[in-house]
Image: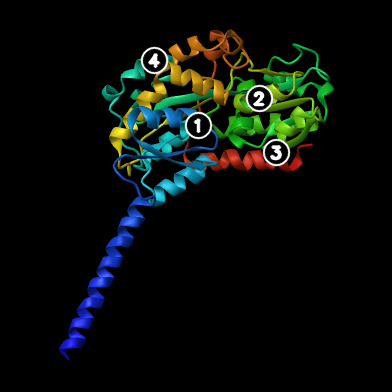
Amino acid sequence: MKKLVLAAIAIILVCLGLQILADKLNNSGVSSGSKDLIIYNWGDYIDPKLLKKFEKQTGYHVIYETFDSNESMYTKIKQGGTAYDICIPSDYMVSKMKESHLLKKINLRKIANIKNIDPQFMNQSFDYGNKYSIPYFWGTLGIIYNDKFVKMGEIKHWNDLWKSKFKHQILLVDSARDIMGLSLISMKNSVNSQDSLKLKLAKTKLDALGANVKAIIADELKMYMIRNEASIGVTWSGEARTMLNENPHLHYVVPSEGSNLWLDNIVIPKTAKNQAGAYAFINFMLDPKNAAQNAKYIGYATPNMLAKKLLPDSIKKDRQFYPATSTMKHLQVFKNLRSEKIQEYNDLFLEFKMYAH
């Protein structure tokens, strides 16, 4: 009997030990020591040489994981598991993560290099006062065209897309907010409009664009433009940069009347275990030389004023990716609208897609 009791106690202790171990694994996801820094970022969205340089300078060991959409990143962080120390969400997602209590407040006093960020990219509507986020890269939505089929300077404004001569020639990126947004801007409305009548009118105007639309696609847009298989596309500046590098006949335009300004940002998730390492990494990435190196590698526009000065003239004076101040004043950042309003945007865009081209 005594042996049975001892055996039962032993089994209970083993079970408790296994439960404690399981809890630890669930809470941490990736096993990390005090010198580990776990970064969650978009794929190929940082120069790998900078990660090695950071490790060498600080002694931290970087564990790097990637995601392919804001939504998948949000879901994984909300579920817990891996205790990420650094994450890179887009503007509207910062707001959503903040509302879901998934972010730690950032102490700007610990980030000496914050002074290098251009003030125009600070204090945005999705995070007033930058209490939770630091600008990483920025870009625009614009029009890319091929000078083999379209005369130079023939496309300057959103309304140019409606010209009858462009019948069945335009590729649109598959994004409800962006495409509804360009229609709203062409009617001098906000990309964050919550007025149902204005949204319906924007959709009606898109319907009139339908005859000019060749396809509404995602990643394939790059391939078609690079291979001269389409005349015109509506896409993001980062994607456009890749296309321009591959095809000298392509040009990118940001309409002066306005467009979407997107901002990707560095945040510290609520579950972060290595805050000291996170602050060290943010300061490291805001160093002008490091930020310039990263901008040259990625090809996106940097919000770092001193880093921009270090870039070659061919990059920093390129109005396709660093628009004139007059255009910048008209750029709008997406706000995280109510879920029912987002659904309204999606439904109207889906209806347009069904009958376009």
Nearest to viewer (mark 1 / mark 2): 1
Which is more N-terminal, label 4 or label 2? Answer: 4
The x, y position of residue 286, in whole percent, is 40, 21
Q: On residue 352, which mark appears?
A: 3
Give the amino acid at mark 2.
Answer: Ala
The x, y position of residue 342, in whole percent, is 53, 39
Label 4 CA crowd tier, 10 Å (few <14, some 14–19, many 20+):
some
Q: On residue 342, which mark appears?
A: none
Q: On residue 240, which mark appears?
A: 2
Give the amino acid at mark 1.
Answer: Pro
Give the amino acid at mark 4.
Answer: Asn
Which is more N-terminal, label 4 or label 1? Answer: 1
Give the amino acid at mark 3.
Answer: Phe
Q: On residue 116, which mark appears?
A: 4
Mark 3 to mark 1: distance in Å? 41 Å
Mark 2 to mark 4: distance in Å? 26 Å
